[in-house]
Amino acid sequence: MKNDKENFKIEFKRRIYKFILQLIKITELLEDKKTVDRIFIGQIIRSVTSIGANYIEAQAASSKKDFINFIHHSLKSANETKFWLALIRDTNKLPKEKVNELLSELIEISNILGASLLTLKGKRN
C-alpha cells in the first residue's frame, strides 16, 4: 500500500496534467491567424508543458540536487505561464472568468512547488 507521500506525488502529477490539458483546450479559442495570438499560443503551450515535463523528470532524478533542479525549473515555468495567462486575460483574448480559474489553479500548483523547494533546501520552518 502506498504511503501519503507517494499518493500525494501521484495526485499532484495528475493535477498538473489536468491543468495542462485545460489550458491547451482554452488556447484553441485563440485565433492562430493573428500574429499576437500565435505568439501567445506558442509561448504559453511551451511554458505550461514545461511545468509537467520538469516535474516528471524530477521523479526520475539521479540525485537530490538533480531533483531540486527539476522542481525549480517546473516552478519557473509555472511563473512564466502565470505571466502569459495574465497577459491573455488583460488583452481580453479569452473569457476572464475562465482565465482567472486557471490562474487560481496555477497559483496553487506554484505554491506547492515553492513549498517543496523550501522543504528540500531545508529552509522551511
Image (spheres, rainbow, N blue to C red):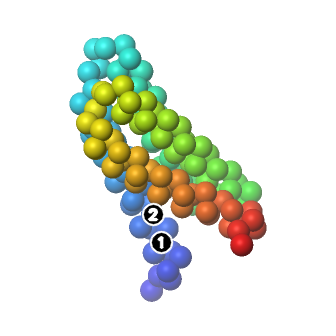
- Residue beneath label 1, please? 8
Residue at the spot 36% in from the left edge and 25% down from the top edge: 91
Going by the numbered disc 1, the residue's amino acid type is Phe
Left or right: where 88 falls relative to 61: left
The spot of residue 87 in percent (x, y) is 43, 30
**Marks 2 and 1 close (CB-CB < 8 Å):** yes
Quadrant housing residue 117? bottom right
The quarter of the rendered structure image containing the C terminus is bottom right
Quarter of the image for residue 31 reads top left
Q: Is mark 2 on a helix, strand or loop?
A: helix
Where does residue 28 sit, x and y in percent of width and height?
26, 32
| 69 up-or-down from 41: above or below | below
The residue at the point 50 percent across, 83 percent down is 3
Horizontally, is 49 left or right of 93 in the view?
right
State which quarter of the image contains the N terminus.
bottom left
Q: Residue 12 carries which label?
A: 2
Residue 101 higher or lower than 29, as above or below: below
Between residue 98 and residue 120, name the one nearer to us: 98
Q: Where is residue 24 in the image (x, y as percent from the top left)?
A: 32, 39
Residue 47 can be seen, yes or no: no
Question: In x, y percent, where is residue 71?
Answer: 61, 54
- When the figure is inspected, residue 38 is found, relative to residue 70, above or below; the finding is above
The secondary structure type at the circle numbered 1 is helix
Residue at x 74%, y 57% (from the top left corner): 65
**Gap in angstroms between the C-alphas marked 2 and 1:** 6 Å
Q: Quadrant of the rendered structure where residue 123 is?
A: bottom right
- Left or right: residue 23 versus residue 49 is left
Q: Nearer the viewer, residue 103 or 112?
A: 103
In this orientation, does residue 113 appear? Answer: yes
Q: Which mark identifies residue 85?
A: none
